[in-house]
């Protein structure tokens, strides 16, 4: 026969694993959804060089070393697109 504390511990452990599995699944789904809504480089008018002093490295959407939260695929820190937004701070 199992003690009450052993049963409670098993439930907590099971709930912990279940919570971790849900978080992992949700994080993966969010990443997939985010990438679905990224613009293509063509849609963003992306170019591999700065424009009027603006470049990816100074953009709030830039994810070093070569990622972007708004545009698909790798981008250059020296690139630019129409979604450029000044990085704060
Ligand atoms: S300028 Fe465009 S491509 Fe570059 S980081 Fe910002 S949003 Fe992305």
Image (spheres, helix red, strand yellow):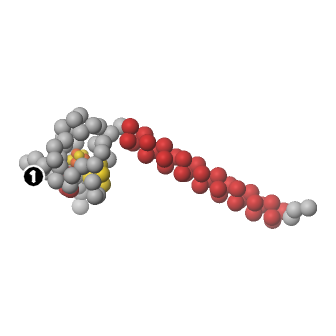
Name the element at disc 1: loop
Q: Position of residue 69 (x, y in %)?
A: 32, 47
Relative to 17, 10 lies left or right: right
Quarter of the picture holding the C terminus: bottom left
Q: Nearer the viewer, residue 42 or 87?
A: 42
Q: Nearer the viewer, residue 24 or 48?
A: 48
Location of residue 46 in the rendering, given as x and y in whole percent from the top left corner = 19, 41
| Residue at figure coordinates x 29%, y 37% from the top left | 39
Among the 4 quarters of the image, the one containing residue 71: top left
Task: Point out residue 5 in the picture as x, y percentages from the top left corner.
Answer: 81, 65
Q: Residue furthest top?
A: 43
Q: Quadrant of the N terminus?
A: bottom right
Is residue 86 shown to the viewer in this render?
no
Decide: few, some or many residues near mark 1? Use Cα within 10 Å; few <14, some 14-19, many ≥20. Answer: few
- At horizontal 24% and vertical 57% (from top left) the residue drawn is 88
Q: Is mark 1 within 8 Å of ligand 1?
A: no
Residue situated furthest right in the rendering: 1
> Which residue is the site of mark 1?
53
Residue, far left: 52
**x, y percentage for residue 47?**
16, 43
**Res. 52 in view:** yes
Q: Does 13 sit left or right of 2 as displayed? A: left
Residue under the image location 71 percent in, 59 percent down = 12
Q: Quadrant of residue 45?
A: top left
| Residue for point 70% across, 56% down | 14
77 sits left or right of 29 in the view: left
């Amino acid at each position: 026969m199992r003690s009450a504390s052993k049963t409670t511990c098993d439930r907590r452990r099971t709930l912990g694993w279940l919570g971790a599995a849900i978080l992992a699944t949700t994080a993966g789904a969010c990443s997939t959804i985010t990438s679905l809504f990224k613009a293509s480089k063509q849609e963003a008018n992306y170019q591999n060089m700065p424009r009027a002093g603006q470049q990816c490295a100074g953009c709030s959407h830039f994810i070093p070393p070569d990622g972007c939260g708004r545009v698909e695929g790798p981008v250059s820190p020296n690139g630019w697109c129409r979604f450029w937004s000044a990085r704060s701070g």
